[in-house]
Structures are given as structure tokens and as C-alpha cells.
Image (cartoon, rainbow, N blue to C red):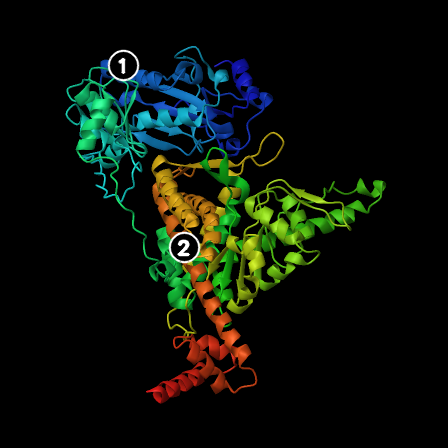
Amino acid sequence: MKKTYLQLLANQNFSIIPCREDKRPLGAWKQYQEKARTEIEVDALNSPLFGIITGFDFLEVVDIDLKVLSTAKEQKNWWDEYLSFLQDNILDFDEKFVIKKTLNNGYHIIYKSKRVQGNTKIASLKGHKEAILESRGFGGMVIIYEKTFGKLNYQDVQFISDEDRDILWSISETYNYIEEQKVIVPKKEKKEYTLIEGNITPWDDFNNKNNVLDIVADEFTLVRNLNDKYIIKRIGATSTHSGYIYKDKDLMYLFSTGSKYEHEKQYSAFSAYVRKHFNDDFSEATKQIYKDGYGSRVVRKEQEPEIKEVLNIEDLKFPIEIFPEPIQAYLLEAKETLNHSIDYMACSLLWVISVSIGNSMKIEIVPGWTENSTIWMSIVGKPGWGKTPSIKRIISPLEKLNSREVKKYHDEMEKFNFYDKLSAKDKKDYPETFKPTKKQFIANDITVEALVDIHGERDIGVGVMKDEQAGWFKDMNKYREGSDKEFWLSCWSGSPVIITRISRVGSYIETPCIPVLGGIQPGVLNEFNNSENKENGFMDRMLLCYPDLKSEYLSRKRMDYDSIQWYSDRIVSFFDFIQHKIVKRDIDGSIDPFISKMSNEAFEVYDKRHREITDIENDEQENQYLKSMLPKQKAYIARFSLLIHVFDDYFKQDGKALEISKESVLKAIRLSDYFIETAKKIKITSSEVNEVRRILDKNKNKTKKELTKAVWDSDKNFNRTDLAEIIDASTRTVRRYVTEFEENSK
């Protein structure tokens, strides 16, 4: 390989490394995964082979290893089929992808993508342990080869669309042999409709109740089950596959001929039925299926009785299964040995994940709608319930990191101030000292202006932790009505914010990311949960954690020190991984966030829940308190999906953080249900407390027993503990009064 060509590649931002004859990198190369060698540095290299680091500058390579096949004929036939498959399904494939031929009759398909991931084993053939298809991404490298397959060379490598990458990977995955895989298409539920005239057409009803494979099963069989599609093969065909059935829409698409169905055309269950039995005569087919019972009939739609809302006890249990199993074990150990609350710890951990990810990643729901990682969390509990110990147990690793950054900044600032005050002559005797940058990423008792300044120097994001969150609520209108509140509402949405005070020039954050966590007492929270904060949507953005707890004896069990250290190491490692491996910047130095997208299956699950929430919003019989908070859950479910998936992917290390799985969305919905039910619980509790206070206000200057009697007369099932707290009595005393009232009423 000529040095001039290597210098050309270095000039085009390829990260070049020297390699041994056995293709292994020569010397340490980790640093060049983040910073490429210059042309001059490349010119100084001397080695038998040279390689390119993948993952750097979004470079990704699909490595085809044909030597796993025994004969040259097998290798050629396999490659010809695979290449033809790609060319048939990716428009202008040869104009987009660079293909290099390797020394062992293999190939490299080279491209750039914002969805580049870690090295991945894509496909292995039946009877072979070695993979025939692998990717090289973050942490990988490939040898530079001179022989080009096609007209494009390394300097022609370009970004491809997400759609083209998805097709490339989907086709590649079809070659992965899965032992004794039995592919079953789930049967559609035979729905019983209560319909009005014109509510559903016969063909829509037919598609709702039948799978397209049911119609074409006499000609096609399933050969693979992928995340978003089934791969089908025409019975008797010599090729390995004939087309797809897309799961999201249940549409068949054939790319081969030879059947009664046209290729390169989409078929639903009904259109396949029409083609098969009526030779594309839709009119006659529609008449027949209507006779068979499909489509609307005139039926009176009865008004459903109003159902009184009650709390779902199962949804009030924090779904600890959303976390990786090692984390679940740690939380359970902390509960068993230290009496910490699972709910408090788990919610604090969500904040830790949010702070760690910050602006480095976003999730796309549909093109044009992305959500960031910001969450606002209120840990609600009465004094003595252990809010602070549970929170500190979880966030302490990040707090220690933050404290070190703050101390380091002050030490460096002290050195800078000393140097800055020196005369020009004296400065010559000291090493040049530059003004340090703040790297603080957690703030507590701080003004909005100071928070904006910190965020300005740390654009990844800043977490706010308030031991007593009441102060944060009170600070909303510290300067003038609405000012701070508007700032925080913009921060939650990730919209640009500008702070201008009389005493300062002004501050600007283009993409704010400020997760909030804090503890608060139920009564204090109730004061802020008023109509004003509901109308502007502020309280609807708060995620509330309010488990039923009581004081417990000191546990006789002891937590393992190794467990404590293990957790701290994992959290610090996760934080460092995001900061140093995930955060990417554009040419202007601004953060260029990675965009995670839902798989087709994941989006179907999200879309279903989105529709359910929308139906509740439009239901005139639904409680207005719930209807106002539900729209924010549409955003939170997406944000939860991102947090859950990225954290889980870090533990699995499978390099799929940019494709949100169906499982992650299901977990996010379960978590959302928990917060919805908790909000309902707090609303019910606060309504009951407000009613008790109203009754007490009508009975001022009466004894505690008389006050208890007044409340008991209004509601026999009132909360004894809440009343005891309000009238400054013990719960036992209130219960004794109630027992007396009950006996006298017999």
C-alpha cells in the first residue's frame, strides 16, 4: 500500500493503524479509536500491513468470511446470491457501498452510518461455528486491501440512510441458521364488534381477522422470523427466500417471480384473497366476504355504565424487573439489610441513568418527534420513612465523582488566579496556566443563573438534587411571577432557554438537559399540587414515588462490602462510558446526539399504548386530573424506553443501544403505569385530606374527640393516620375514639 494513498485516507479522516502480517494491530491502538493520526504521522509508519479503525467517524464494515465454505464454487454461488439480494433490494446499491476483496476470497462492505454499533456476529451457516457475516464497528478494525470489487474505493465511502442500513442488516440476518427453529405466525384474534352502520368495511374486517400467510400458505412457507418481518420461500423454489411478510402491517412483498402473485407489489390478506380466488375482481370478492359475515351491521350501541375508578394494587408495586438482573439483586440486598425502600432506590436510579446519558442520546418516536433523557422525580414520604438514606445509597457514586470535579475545579482556579495576577515578567518563570472549565454535573442549592452558567460549560447536562424539594418548588417564582417556572418548563421539553436579569447580561442554553430528583412530604406536595400548577402542566411533568412504608427494626443481616463496591464501580463505569465513548460532537464542537429508534415491533407496542392514552384523553367521563397528566406519559414512555434500553444494553454489551427493543418499550409502559397509579393515589389521598380539613374548619374550637366524630359522621372509612397527624393526636387515640363511636351506634 503506497504511503501517498494512506496519507490521502488520513486527510479524509480515516484512522490508520499499522498491522502485523497476521493482521493484528502493531502496538497500542486504543487512543486512535478516538483521534486519528495525521498525514505526517501516517508517513512515519512502517509495517507489512495497514488497517482502518471502525467506529471512528461513523465507519462501519460488514465482513464476509467465505473461507467457512469448503469449495470455490460454494463460495462464488453464496456471494453471487448475497450480492444479488442486496442489489435487488437497495436502490443504487453499487453507488452507495464500497466493496473490497480480501486476501482470503472474502469481502468488506464499507459505509458510514449514524447507527454504527459495536462488533457484532450477524450470521453463521448450518454446521459452521465461524460466522460468515460479522460487523466491525466501535472497538474494531479492518485491514486495508488494494483490490476493489466495483468502481468505488475507500475515499468514496459515504453515509447511507437508516433505511438502507436496515435492509443490509435484515438481509444479512436471514442467513443466520437457527437450529430447529419453528416459526409460527400468531393467529389474529377473532374480534366480536359492537358496530354501527359504516363503522368498518368488509375488507378491513377481513384483514383484522386473517393473516396474509393464511391465504398464501398453499404456495409459501416461513423460513425465518426477524424482529420486523417474516422471510418466506415459495414451495419448491431453489432460492433460499422469495420475499417478506412485514409484521407491522401484515403485508406480503415478493421479490421473485414464479407464483400467482405479482412480485414487487404489496399484498394484504384481502388483496391476496382477491388475487387467489377472484382474479383481482375486488367487487365480487367484497360481495362474498360480506355474505360471510365480514363488515359492519346495524347494531344499537349501548351506553356503557360509568365505572368508579379504583387503584390497581399491582401497578402500585415498582416494576423492579425493568433493570438488569445484577441491579435487581443489589436493590433487594439493600432492602433486606438496610431497610431501604425499593421504590425510593429504583426511582433514584432512573435519575442516575438520566444524568449519565444527558444530551448524548435521544429517542425518535416518528420523524420530527424526538425526546430527550430528562426526568423529574419527587420522592414522597413522611418524616422517618427513610427517603434520604434510600436516595443516597443509589446516587452516592455520582455524588463522589461530582465532588472530585468541583474540588479539582477550585484547585485549578486557584492556580489560575495566582498566575493571572503575576506580571508579564514573572509569568515567564511559571508554566502557562489556562482558566479551567467547570465539569460539575450535579447541583443542589443553586440559583437558576448559576445553574445556567454550569450547564453552559457542561453541555452534556446537569442533574439537580434537592434533599428537600419544597425549596425547589418555592424558588419557581423567586424573582417575578412565572419567570423561573417558564424556564423549567422549557428545560423539561429540551427547548432553548434564555435567562436575562437586570443584574446580568444574559445566558443561553441551546439544548437544556436538567434531570431533577428530591424528597418531599405529602402535605407539602399537596400545597403545590394546585390548580395553577395543573393548568400550566408543571405538576403533570413530575413523576411521583409514594410507597406505603412504616418504620422498621434494624436488620440483623449485613450488606456485603463487595456488593457496595460492585455497585459503585458499575455506576461510575456506566457514567464514564457515556461521557467518553458515546458523546459525539460536530465540527463546531456542539454535541451531536445519537438517535435511538424503536424497532418495528417496539413501535407497534408504543403506538398501541399511545392510542389507549389518546382514547382516555378524549373520554368525557374520565377524571380531569388524570386526563391532564396522561399526555406527558406519551413522552415519558419514550424517555423510559431510552433509559431502560441503554442501561440494559450496557450490561449486555451487545451494541444495540440505537435500536430500542419491544421488551424495553413494554418495560417502559409498565413503569409509566406505576407512576400513573401513584399519581392517582396521591390525588385520592390529597382529596380525602382536603375533605377532612374542610370538616375540621367547620368545627373549630372543638375537642379532638369531637373533631374525630365530625369526620367519622361524614366518612366511616376515613384515614385514621392522616386525621391523627392533622389534629396532633396519636393514631391509637383516633382508633379508640372510632371504636367507641361504633359501639354507641349499635
- Observer-nearest of 160 and 280: 280
Residue at (55, 27) in percent of width and height: 36
For the residue pair 264 and 175, the one nearer the viewer reads as: 264
Residue 307 occupies which quadrant of the picture?
bottom left
Marks 2 and 1 close (CB-CB < 8 Å): no
- Mark 2 surroundings within 10 Å by alpha-carbon count, few (fewer than 14), some (14 through 19), many (20 or more): few
Q: Please give left or right for residue 539 compared with residue 334 in the image.
A: right
Q: Residue at x 53, y 19 (%)?
A: 9
Question: Residue flagged by tag 2: what amino acid is it?
Answer: Gln
Q: How many marks?
A: 2
Q: Residues within 10 Å of mark 1 (few under 14, many from 20)?
A: some
The CA span between labels 2 and 1 is: 67 Å
Q: Is label 1 in a helix, a strand or a loop?
A: helix
* Horizontal side of residue 508 vs 652, given as left or right: right
User: Which corner quadrant holds the C terminus?
Assistant: bottom left
Decide if residue 327 is in sight here.
Answer: yes
- The residue under label 1 is 76
Residue 355 percent coordinates (x, y):
53, 49
Residue 64's x, y, as percent?
Answer: 33, 22
Which disc, if any, is residue 621?
A: 2
Identify residue type, mark 1: Lys
Residue 268 position within the rendered picture, expressed as x and y whole percent measured from the top left? 27, 27
